[in-house]
Image (cartoon, grey):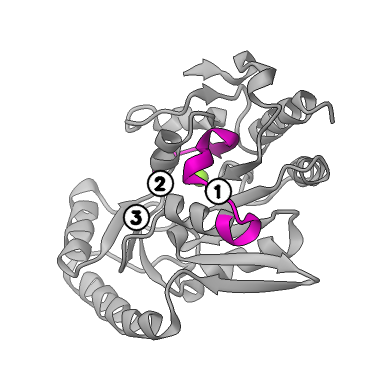
Amino acid sequence: MLLWACCEPRRLSALRGILTDIDDTLTTEGAIPMGVAAALSALRAAGLPVIAVTGRPMGWSRAIAADTPLAAIVAENGAVALIAEAGAVRVEYADDAALREANAVRLRAAADRIVREVPGATLSRDSAGRVTDIAIDHAEFAHLDAARIAHVVALMREEGMTATVSSIHVNGWFGTHSKLTGAAWIVRRLFGRDLMAERDDWLYVGDSTNDELMFASFALSVGVANLMDFADRLVQWPAFIATHERGRGFVEIAESLLAARGA
Ligand SMILES: [Mg+2]
């Protein structure tokens, strides 16, 4: 891993766009600072669309999609996209309505079983906004030890779900979508482009263990400095690390991108 300041500007001059995590990458203490909003506007004006990719729910993402100059938000680990258009937020789903309805019944049953069988397990407080997945809180407001986190993951897998552990939640869903498939879907939907064939033309920014798939998938991947909080758990590291943490780290990255384009 190299310091972001060491990235050669010529590698950044022809980028097509930026993919980024939200929590603790764009946000600082839960909010998007003014400096980050200004950087997102400047990137957009320079012809660099920014797509946010998050494990957060559709409901939680809606206000951010409405208020922030992002091209789109891919939420619920690739299942839902929110696109701000003409003053409204359009919501699109990777799965069709019939499949989502069938899955909703199975999601409720799986959530009931986990809460019943794992002592202390509770649904995350953002669960009301979730449409295609369930989330068990292990570190946001609740605390589950490693054995109980493993128990939750095992029950999700037994129910036929895909399960991931973020810094705060255990997420489970039906289907094989991911932050990467969701990003590829929305790049095709918005720009008619093939993200997987053009991975060298996109940059990814993240801050934690649930960004590892994206760090592994993009040669130009960057961690904001607080990624080091996960140093003992991280297997797949990004190519670069910013000097600053959270929103300030994102601004540091945006400034280099804008300078490389002469913007
Ligand atoms: Mg994050």
Please identify the quarter of the rendering in which residue 100 is found.
Answer: bottom left
Label 1, label 2: how many angstroms apart (C-alpha)? 10 Å
**Magenta-highlighted residues:** 188-210
Give the label, 3 or 2, closer to the camera.
Answer: 2
* Image quadrant in which you'd find residue 118: bottom left
Residue 205 rendering spot, x and y as whole percentages: 56, 37
Q: Is residue 256 above or below residue 54?
A: above
Q: Which residue is mark 2?
A: 167
Amino acid type, residue under disc 2 in the picture: Ser
Q: Which mark is residue 138?
A: 3
Give the side of residue 187 with respect to residue 138, left or right. Answer: right
Please name which of the two marks, 1 or 3, marks the residue nearer to the observer.
1
The residue identified by callout 1 is: 23
Label 1 close to label 2 by CB (< 8 Å): yes
Mark before the other along the chain sequence, 3 or 2: 3
Inspect this view and state whether residue 54 appears. no
Query: Residue at the location (78% across, 28% down)?
Result: 261
Residue in the foreground of this view, choosing between 155 and 148:
155
Give the residue type that dot 1 points to: Asp
Task: Report the side of 126 relative to 151 (left or right).
Answer: right
In percent of width and height, residue 66 lies at 72, 65
Kindly tell me whether residue 7 is visible in this rendering: yes
Up-down relation of residue 105 to residue 142 (above or below):
below
Q: Which residue is drawn at the image coordinates 72% and 42% (left, top)? A: 48
**Is tag 1's residue or tag 2's residue first in the polypeptide sequence?**
1
Label 2: element kind: loop
Callout 3, which amino acid? His
Q: CA distance from mark 3 to mark 2?
A: 8 Å
The relative height of residue 195 versus residue 176 in the rendered view (above or below) is: above
